[in-house]
Image (cartoon, grey):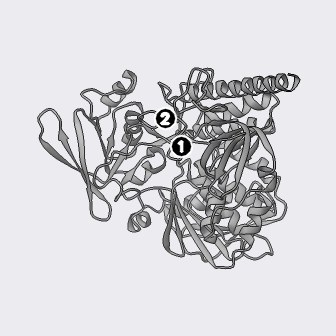
């Protein structure tokens, strides 16, 4: 399997950073899959004199392990070819195995090294999955730092038979000591918490001992934009969130961002994170805010029990996929019910699937899945599709996409995994059943505001109510993005709202300071 020349040039540059020699141990057969892995490993080793290839016996064939020459096993293996979104995971693993220290906090490193139980992790991943690398890289770091921990990334496309046998229909899916352990995105801190069986960790004193000018809750486009604008005003700014990236991490291609013809969601948020760090914004991830209140200052209580204090706060927690709430949806989540076609689509290669939702996200999902699956049926509740006409035209031109409107999903059926879907034709009131192996739900978003309570005002849809300046009904607290009652949920609109919120917070700080000065002088 030839590595693209552009990727090869990038890799050659990274390999110059290897600190010590690395041995790649391969276990190969004579099949085509083994040939692909062999070609990949040999092309990599040819790029650096510090890399050698040896044969050995591993759990899966084909697969390969990474170890520093002359040292004990790192515990890191790749069953498959780590290209696509896993290319970065492979490069980081190479560097860390060679001796580069992972870029993590001293507290997290100490917690990983303190684990004394033997933990063998296996992560089924898709090369097109945006969420998988976070999990793969986190477990690789844990393996490098602790000899009790080992981790294998398994490419679901190459090991589809094993994925089917283990009933894996969503990625990333992590097994611990051969038992299913975790599904979906997670940060290193969250995985360490789960592995150690501990409660959320307390934050460092420099977070709780100071009073920030503004604390931003969330780390998506609105939060990132707010942080950049606030920091450029010269005020002390902090972000707190469970992870950095937000909803765009589930978006492969963004083509409607003014001035940018095309960018992947993951790359967009990486660019924003770089900007945020450039301006010295303090970022706290792996933490969840559970309560916000306004006293003399704004107080934000974390899941750990710690309290952050700020003169102002901006809530930008975004939204998550909306569920349909029918029988079978919760039961078969990750067992045939999925919400991210880009991540989980490859696991449904050659299968019949349905997409619920005829808006832009639903039709885009159908078009993407049509290139992988045998047949895609789109079910839209309304009398007409809501997607842009250009998307509808593309879907209508596809021979393996069926579009059904006025369809009310009644039940998702299955036995251990999805085997079908029942819907009602709202015009004739007749009931129909589709034999399927997957259902992708694409019916919009629900705001991440379950932690919000009075006196903050929310709408009937539990969106935070804001005015034209992104101010809430509570003095000094602002909100922006998809968690608010904004008319449209778009990345560019969230960014603009985040900037507005930051400027409004700055204006509030200036006016508050002036009032205090006038009061003292009086």
Q: Is residue 127 above or below residue 20?
A: above
According to the picture, the residue beneath numbered tag 2 turns out to be 458
Q: CA distance from mark 2 to mark 1?
A: 8 Å
Q: Is residue 268 visible?
A: no
Which residue is rendered at x = 60% and y = 26% of the image? 470
Left or right: residue 225 compared with residue 323 = right
Q: Nearer the viewer, residue 423 or 454?
A: 454
Q: Nearer the viewer, residue 320 or 297?
A: 297
According to the picture, the residue beneath numbered tag 1 turns out to be 452
Q: SS at mark 2?
A: loop
Which percent across, then down, holds residue 328? 30, 55
Which residue is rendered at x = 81% and y = 58% of the image? 18
Q: Residues within 10 Å of mark 1 (few under 14, many from 20)?
A: some
Q: Is residue 241 above or below residue 150?
A: above
Q: Is residue 348 visible?
A: yes
Which percent across, then down, holds residue 357? 34, 37
For the image, the number of numbered tags is 2
Which residue is rendered at x = 76% and y = 57% of the image? 104
Instruction: Examine the image and state in which quarter residue 107 appears.
Output: bottom right
Q: Are marks 2 and 1 in contact (CB under 8 Å)?
A: yes
Q: Residues within 10 Å of mark 2 (few under 14, many from 20)?
A: many
Q: SS at mark 1?
A: loop
Instruction: Examine the image and state in which quarter residue 466 appears.
Output: top right
């Amino acid at each position: 399997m030839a590595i693209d020349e552009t990727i090869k040039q990038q890799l050659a540059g990274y390999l110059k950073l290897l600190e010590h020699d690395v041995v790649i141990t391969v276990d190969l057969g004579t099949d085509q899959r083994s040939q692909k892995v062999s070609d990949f490993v040999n092309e990599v080793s040819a790029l650096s004199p510090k890399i050698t290839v040896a044969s050995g016996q591993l759990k899966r064939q084909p697969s390969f392990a990474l170890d520093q020459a002359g040292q004990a096993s790192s515990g890191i293996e790749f069953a498959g070819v780590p290209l696509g979104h896993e290319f970065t995971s492979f490069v980081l693993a190479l560097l860390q195995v060679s001796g580069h220290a992972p870029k993590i906090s001293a507290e997290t490193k100490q917690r990983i090294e303190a684990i004394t139980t033997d933990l063998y992790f296996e992560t089924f991943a898709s090369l097109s999955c945006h969420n998988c690398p976070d999990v793969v890289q986190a477990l690789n770091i844990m393996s490098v730092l602790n000899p009790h921990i080992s981790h294998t990334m398994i490419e679901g496309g190459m090991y589809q038979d094993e994925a089917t046998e283990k009933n894996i229909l969503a990625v990333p899916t992590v097994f611990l000591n051969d038992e299913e352990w975790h599904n979906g995105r997670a940060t290193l801190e969250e995985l360490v918490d789960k592995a150690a069986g501990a409660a959320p960790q307390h934050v460092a004193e420099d977070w709780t001992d100071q009073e920030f000018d503004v604390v931003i809750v969330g780390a998506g486009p609105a939060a990132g934009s707010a942080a950049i604008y606030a920091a450029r005003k010269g005020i002390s700014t902090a972000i707190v969130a469970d992870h950095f990236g937000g909803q765009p991490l589930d978006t492969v291609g963004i083509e409607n961002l003014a001035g940018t013809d095309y960018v992947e969601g993951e790359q967009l948020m990486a660019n924003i994170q770089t900007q945020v760090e450039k301006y010295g914004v303090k970022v706290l991830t792996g933490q969840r805010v559970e309560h916000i209140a306004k006293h003399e200052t704004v107080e934000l209580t974390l899941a750990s029990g710690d309290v952050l204090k700020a003169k102002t706060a901006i809530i930008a927690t975004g939204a998550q996929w909306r569920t349909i709430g029918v029988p079978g949806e919760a039961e078969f989540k990750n067992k045939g019910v999925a919400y991210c076609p880009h991540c989980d689509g490859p696991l449904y290669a050659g299968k019949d699937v349905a997409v619920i939702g005829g808006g832009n996200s639903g039709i885009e999902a159908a078009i993407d899945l049509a290139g992988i699956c045998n047949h895609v049926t789109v079910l839209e509740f309304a009398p007409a599709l809501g997607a842009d006409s250009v998307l509808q035209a593309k879907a209508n031109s596809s021979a393996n996409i069926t579009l059904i409107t006025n369809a009310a999903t009644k039940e998702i059926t299955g036995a251990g995994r999805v085997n079908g879907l029942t819907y009602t034709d709202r015009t004739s009131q007749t009931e129909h059943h589709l034999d399927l192996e997957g259902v992708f739900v694409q019916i919009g978003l629900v705001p991440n505001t379950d932690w919000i309570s009075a006196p903050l005002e929310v709408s009937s849809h539990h969106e935070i109510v804001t005015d034209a300046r992104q101010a809430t009904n509570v003095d000094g607290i602002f909100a922006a993005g998809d968690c608010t009652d904004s008319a449209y949920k778009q990345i560019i609109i969230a960014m603009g709202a985040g900037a507005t919120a930051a400027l409004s917070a700055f204006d509030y700080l200036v006016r508050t300071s002036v009032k205090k000065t006038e009061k003292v002088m009086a």
